[in-house]
Amino acid sequence: MSLFHRKKEVSLPTERLLPQHIGIIMDGNGRWAKRRGLPRQAGHGYGARVFRTITKYCEKIGIRYVTVYAFSTENWRRPQEEVDAIMNLLRDYLRESLRDFQKENIRTRFIGEREALAPDIRALIEEAESSTAHKTGMVLNIALNYGGRDELVHAMRSLAEEVKAGRLSPEEIDETRISDRLYTAGQPDPDMILRPSGEYRLSNFMIWQAAYSEYVFQDILWPDYRQKDLDAALEEYARRNRRFGGI
Ligand code: FPP
């Protein structure tokens, strides 16, 4: 059994090497479905199930923050049928988690631009956030209509407004002031970013926050992703020597 299998079994030095914040790019749903002769939406359905099991597992082993990439600002370009299917999976998940939120100690948050989302999804999101705001366990950020560049544009606009209003001088703009205007304000940057499916890119995911993240790319399609694959990623992370620009 892996060292990371249960919270209790993680020894102290290992716990030290456990990432505090994991970012996950849940990729490969479409290919998974295509290989089985199924519509792409079926892949997202399986992907949503894996999302539930993997995030619960993260909570169980003591990860403090998990951010999953559910829908990007670019994903609107997909066929309407596929966009609708992903939004329906989110509706199902939100309704289910509102029903079951007492069972878990997970604080759910959404990051991304909400204006473009359907009013019922926005209402469900607000309910999910407010009903879990008091939770003390893992923070789960769901990136929905999220883009790293879009997030930075919003942060820059907000800083520009402050400069225009005379509340801030350009010289006072620093990394902390930018981080404080991101959706993830107040949270640690991701220590590790996972991308299954054999693709080696960030795809506009947490581009500011990922400056010093360790990337772990795995050749597994997201619907096939299991706890053992996360264990392997954690073991890989624990072997990395993070230097943050030092030596
Ligand atoms: C990327 O795979 C996946 C997505 C764009 C959608 C992810 C959505 C879910 C897992 C379900 C809904 C989420 C929640 C939180 C309930 P892809 O379609 O780009 O795969 P491909 O590269 O094989 O085409």
Image (spheres, helix red, strand yellow):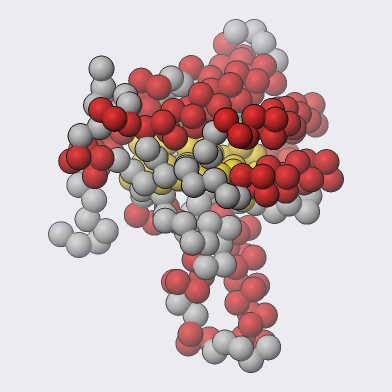
Q: Quadrant of the C terminus?
A: bottom left
Q: Is residue 117 above or below residue 46?
A: below
**Residue 152's spot in the image, x, y percent?**
58, 63
Q: Hey, which quadrant is residue 144 in on the image?
A: top right
Front residue (pair 30, 132): 132
**Residue 107's spot in the image, x, y percent?**
56, 44
**Residue 189's spot in the image, x, y percent?**
42, 55
Q: Is residue 238 left or right of residue 49?
A: left
Q: Is residue 165 above or below residue 17?
A: below
Q: Is residue 56 above or below residue 66?
A: above
**Residue 29's spot in the image, x, y percent?**
58, 23
Front residue (pair 141, 149): 141
* Residue that appears at 70% across and 53% down: 113
- Ligand 1 is in which quadrant of the figure? top right
Outermost residue, left direction? 247
- Specify whether residue 72 is in view: no
How many numbered discs, if any? 0
